[in-house]
Image: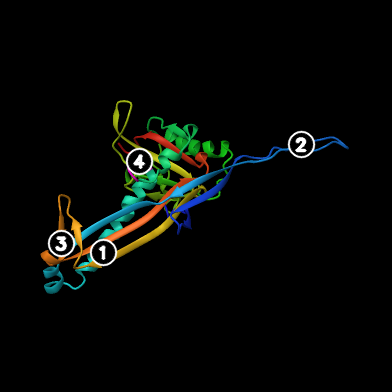
Amino acid sequence: MIRQAGAVEYPMPSGTLHLPKVATGVTGGYIGENANPTHSNPVFGENILTWKKLAVTSAISNDLLRYNSPQSDAVVRDDIVRSLSVTEDAAFIRSQGVGGEPKGLRYWASAGSIIAANTVSIANVTADLGKAIYTMLNNNVPVTKGAWLLSPRSWYYLITIRDAVGNLAFQPEMKGGTLFGYPFFVTTSIPINLTVATNTDCSEVYFVNFDDVVIGDSQRLLIDVSSEAAYYNGSSVVAAFSLDQTVIRAIAEHDLVVRDSNAVVVVTGVRWGV
């Protein structure tokens, strides 16, 4: 979903990618006649992407393949692809970047781009959404590819809430695929059981400029199938050949960086729909 939302994707064949960035920009100034212009040099930095490996193995009985549907392996393969996609999105959104995982959007956001949600009402929710956009604009981020990330619970609240006279407050616009003029994406990878203060049922809402989100792929998705491989089943290494099984292995290698930490705004403590 992070890819679908518009993150910039680069090939990373060597496993590492160095992205230059301007840490401090040039500053100009007005001058009088016959005066020298202000001299200002930019200060450069870089973001470094380094491959992180996402992998899984799955074993299928060859009896199933022989005597049931010849498409059983395709069903398992498709399930693996969907599962890895969900795992990738969860990491890209909320991983802290430890244990071999990429750092997610939540932990790329600057401290000033994390804002607390108000108590739930149409007026407060409208203000929270507006403040997310305002926070990004106020930090001089050109919102060239802005988009929202919502949990299903937050989405459900927004499309069903009515104002004081019974009109659906957000649904008319959301039917067209936008919220405050920007597209939105719904994912279960945003939890609804986060703890904020004394509440244990909180979620988050993200407003992201995806032109500043970069995914480097050193291996997009590699799927191998073998009836002779050995694999680790969680407690020991077993042989597929001996067990008359076929093993499917899927591997993807990638990393994610955000070029400008102000390009991710996170509304925390969201209890819309509770």
Q: Who comes first in sequence, dot 2 or dot 1?
A: 2
- Reading the image, the residue beneath label 2 is 38
Q: Which residues are magenta?
A: 94-100
Q: From the viewer's side, name the closer residue of 47 and 150.
A: 47
**How busy is the neighbourhood of tag 1: few (under 14 within 10 Å), some, or many (20 plus)?**
some
C-alpha distance separating marks 3 and 4 = 31 Å
Q: Say what amino acid the circle numbered 3 marks.
A: Ala
Can residue 158 be seen here? no
- Reading the image, the residue beneath label 1 is 77
- Reading the image, the residue beneath label 3 is 239
Q: Quadrant of residue 160?
A: top left
Q: Who comes first in sequence, dot 4 or dot 2?
A: 2
Vertically, is 50 above or below 26?
below
Q: Say what amino acid the circle numbered 2 marks.
A: Thr
Residue that protrudes farthest toward the top in the picture: 198
Q: Please name the residue shown 34% across and 47% down the image.
A: 90
- Reading the image, the residue beneath label 4 is 98
Q: Say what amino acid the circle numbered 1 marks.
A: Arg
